[in-house]
């Protein structure tokens, strides 16, 4: 007991320092999360009174024939696999080229690659929607001009191509961030390691594999984790470009939450969906973190 | 002790948060049952060529201090440039008699969602435009002021085309919570040159004649009827017209006003979807694979303007785009007794508005009932619900043609406005029908399931 009291007294200043941030965290994160969970146990429509329905919303999500949960989850998993890896791979390759190959004006190139990141997502998505227009969009127009008319598609209207088309727009927006982060990380790797590797006769590829990759492992893990989180949070691209269509072919979980919670005024059901989405995201993040920790050991 | 205090603080934060969650205001107030579905439905069309002109000096609430310094927040659905300019004109006119009023226009394309969020958070705008469904939704929380006295005092019903004012308020029979000033008819715009080439000299008088024209256009190598499939609205409106054509309107009203789902409505929907599936298979509605990627925002300039489309179903709000397309365009109404034509929302007032703001609202709405303002909307291509003598107006010929086309048509519903969220559901469910992924019966089942999810409890 005395020991505990001494610890509190010693650390009072530290606790006082973090208290404002903790309060903000509690008020703007914990409380809304708890509110959301409580709302998910009701049939509230956002305006009238709320009736407690227990776990009915959750049962509906997983078992109702009208539920779009599995379709949305399928699309999110597609996004998870490709949306987490492609920006990372492209960013890593580019960063390595820029930093290790001592390309002139690499800072300018970094800035150019980062530009999509600073563009408004809305503006970028509107532009991509025009690019993909099946009648007069540049993609189909270029294909026609180079004699590949048979490759023309309705990029956002064809159920086989819509997710790929959205993914291309997403990768274009996201890989600049990876490039900049990896560039900084690679620059932080001790150059003497590369010199030693060169003396040992290692070529570029072996240096990348045995020096660069281990050196930036923590950064790589963080960037992949951020991309994983981003793949579950994707909403703006889908909302602006396809609204989840055609049909439900590009439906994602976050759009499902929006649709049910705000458009259909099923706030209780929407809250339950958001809780499920959060739980999924938490699970995936924990699994990934455990895997990477095990690899490091 | 510090530990105990920290725990108490945390617990208080949680309790405070929980006590604020859940329902807001009381149970449903004025929503739901509307037994008087007949008035607007039987109304005689949207023609604005009747002789009675709206009064210039409509009475407003007396005794109001028009020099009062007030701030009015406004949120509307007037997102297109033409209507924004007209709204700014109205605001300028309003400020002539309310010089110290500050009007903040918060119009946004997501106005429906924003209005709901702001009202439920206790910070709703003062003046809003609401459609009949949004009105019902907001009335559940008693967020809108009862304007019945205002409507009667200013005789808005007498000054409007028959059934217009009642139409927006049919979910609250006997009471008025909004005052519409515009209609939103959906018509068929057609390429006159293509029609001439096909030997079609007059608009079709039946669905069979319409189908025959589409067949001729298809044989001649044109797209008979285009559909901007990304939102699928053109196809949805076509479906609604087919439903009006084959279903008793009184039964449709039962469904629309959330009272019941008669078997005739189910059959009407399925038959309409079967017709659409048939026309799609025949190529009358374009190639779904291409059309599903076409955006409504630019299909007129990207597709219709190329001159390869014979017809397209769209609203009067796009008339300027059709006029600017470079295509020799005409317009006719769908060959049925009822057409998709509802009041294009109505002006409503925050229930918390005090006397001064209520008086300001009355003066503001009266501006939209002046002949000058009605004429401006008409010339810009819109369809006022206010009676207006259009004989000497400077409206373009296409506009006059549109007014003539809808003059003797009865008001029908945007069926996707029956319950919240139904528009989004019908849009994507009919996309699947269009793509051949679902049958008419499956399409109906999914729509009905979405409808039942959105029913007001």
Image: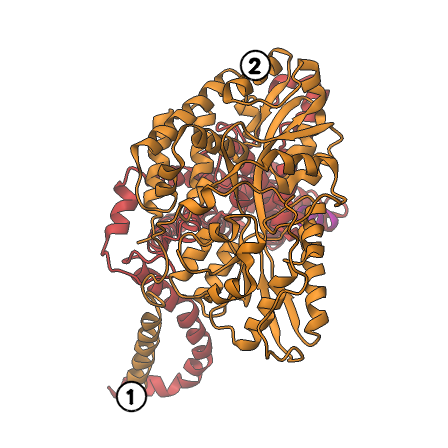
Chain colours: A red, B orange
Q: Which mark is residue B215?
A: 2
Magenta region: which residues?
A: A108-114
Provide residue B290's location: percent of width, then percent of height.
57, 25
Could you give the CA–CA distance between mark 1 and mark 2, rounded to whole angstroms? 86 Å
Provide residue A257's location: percent of width, then percent of height.
41, 50
Residue sticking out furthest to the top: B219
Provide residue B16's location: percent of width, then percent of height.
34, 75
Quadrant hosting residue B307: top right
B304 in relation to B129, above or below: above
Seen in the image, is B286 located left or right of residue A268? right
Residue at figure coordinates x 36%, y 63% from the top left: A33
Seen in the image, is A218 located left or right of residue B382? left
| 1 vs 2, front mark | 2
Residue at figure coordinates x 68%, y 73% from the top left: B98
Q: Is residue A95 visible?
A: no
Compare residues B45 and A3 and report the one nearer the observer. B45
Q: Is residue A112 magenta?
A: yes
Query: Main structural element of the magenta stretch: helix, strand or loop?
Result: helix
Compare residues B120 and A90 and report the one nearer the observer. B120
Seen in the image, is A55 located left or right of residue B224? left
| Residue that badge 1 annotates | B1
Where disc 1 sits, the SS reads loop
């Amino acid at each position: 007991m005395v020991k505990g009291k001494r610890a509190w007294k010693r650390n009072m200043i530290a606790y006082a320092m973090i208290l404002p941030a903790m309060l903000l965290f509690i008020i703007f994160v914990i409380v809304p999360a708890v509110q959301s969970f409580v709302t998910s146990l009701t049939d509230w429509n956002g305006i009238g009174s709320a009736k407690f329905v227990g776990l009915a919303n959750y049962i509906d999500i997983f078992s109702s024939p009208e539920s779009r949960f599995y379709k949305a989850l399928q699309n999110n998993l597609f996004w998870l696999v490709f949306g987490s890896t492609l920006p990372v791979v492209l960013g890593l390759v580019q960063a390595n080229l820029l930093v290790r190959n001592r390309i002139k004006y690499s800072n300018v190139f970094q800035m150019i690659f980062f530009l999509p990141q600073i563009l408004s997502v809305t503006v970028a998505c509107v532009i991509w929607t025009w690019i993909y227009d099946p009648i007069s969009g540049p993609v189909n127009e270029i294909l026609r001009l180079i004699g590949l008319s048979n490759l023309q598609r309705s990029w956002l209207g064809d159920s086989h191509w819509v997710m790929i088309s959205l993914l291309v727009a997403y990768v274009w927006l996201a890989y600049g961030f990876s490039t900049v982060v990896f560039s900084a990380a690679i620059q932080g790797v001790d150059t003497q390691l590369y010199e030693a590797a060169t003396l040992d006769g290692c070529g570029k590829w072996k240096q990348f594999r045995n020096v660069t990759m281990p050196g930036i492992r923590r950064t790589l893990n963080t960037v992949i984790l951020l991309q994983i989180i981003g793949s579950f949070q994707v909403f703006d691209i889908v909302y602006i470009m396809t609204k989840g269509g055609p049909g439900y072919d590009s439906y994602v979980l976050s759009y499902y939450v929006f649709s049910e919670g705000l458009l259909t005024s099923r706030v209780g059901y929407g809250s339950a969906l958001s809780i499920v989405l959060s739980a999924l995201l938490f699970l995936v993040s924990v699994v990934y973190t455990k895997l990477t920790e095990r690899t490091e050991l | 002790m510090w530990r105990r205090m920290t725990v108490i603080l945390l617990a208080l934060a949680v309790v405070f948060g929980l006590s604020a969650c859940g329902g807001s205001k009381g149970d449903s107030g004025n929503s739901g049952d509307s037994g008087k579905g007949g008035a607007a439905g039987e109304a005689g069309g949207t023609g604005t060529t009747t002789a009675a002109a709206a009064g210039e000096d409509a009475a407003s609430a007396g005794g109001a201090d028009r020099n009062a310094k007030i701030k009015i927040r406004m949120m509307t659905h007037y997102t297109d440039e033409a209507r924004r300019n007209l709204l700014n004109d109205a605001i300028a006119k309003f400020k002539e008699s309310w010089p110290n009023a500050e009007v903040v226009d918060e119009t946004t394309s997501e106005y429906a969602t924003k209005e709901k969020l702001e009202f439920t958070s206790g910070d709703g705008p003062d003046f809003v435009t609401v459609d009949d469904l949004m009105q019902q939704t907001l009335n559940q929380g008693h967020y809108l002021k009862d304007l019945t006295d205002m409507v009667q005092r200013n005789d808005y019903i007498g000054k409007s085309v028959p059934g217009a004012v009642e139409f927006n308020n049919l979910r609250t029979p006997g009471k008025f919570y909004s005052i519409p000033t515009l209609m939103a008819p959906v018509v068929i715009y057609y390429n006159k040159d293509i029609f001439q080439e096909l030997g079609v000299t007059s608009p079709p008088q039946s669905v069979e004649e319409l189908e025959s024209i589409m067949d001729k256009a298809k044989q001649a190598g044109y797209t008979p009827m285009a559909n901007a499939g990304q939102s699928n609205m053109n196809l949805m409106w076509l479906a609604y017209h087919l439903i009006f054509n084959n279903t008793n309107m009184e039964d449709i009203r039962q469904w629309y006003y959330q009272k019941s789902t008669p078997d005739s409505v189910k059959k009407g929907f399925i038959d309409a979807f079967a017709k659409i599936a048939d026309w799609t298979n025949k190529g009358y509605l374009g190639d779904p694979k291409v059309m599903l990627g076409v955006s409504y925002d630019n299909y007129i300039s990207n597709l219709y303007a190329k001159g390869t489309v014979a017809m397209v179903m769209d609203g009067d709000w796009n008339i300027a785009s059709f006029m600017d397309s470079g295509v020799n365009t005409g317009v006719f109404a769908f060959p049925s007794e009822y057409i998709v034509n509802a009041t294009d929302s109505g002006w409503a007032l925050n229930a918390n508005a005090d006397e001064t703001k209520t008086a300001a609202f009355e003066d503001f709405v009266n501006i939209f009932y002046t002949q000058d303002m009605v004429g401006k909307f008409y010339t810009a291509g819109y369809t006022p619900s206010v009676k207006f003598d259009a004989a000497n107006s400077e409206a373009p010929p296409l506009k006059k043609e549109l007014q003539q086309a809808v003059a003797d048509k009865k008001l029908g519903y945007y069926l996707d406005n029956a319950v919240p969220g139904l528009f989004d559901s019908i849009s994507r469910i009919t996309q699947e029908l269009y793509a051949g992924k679902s049958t008419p019966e499956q399409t109906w089942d999914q729509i009905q399931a979405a409808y039942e999810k959105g029913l007001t409890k």
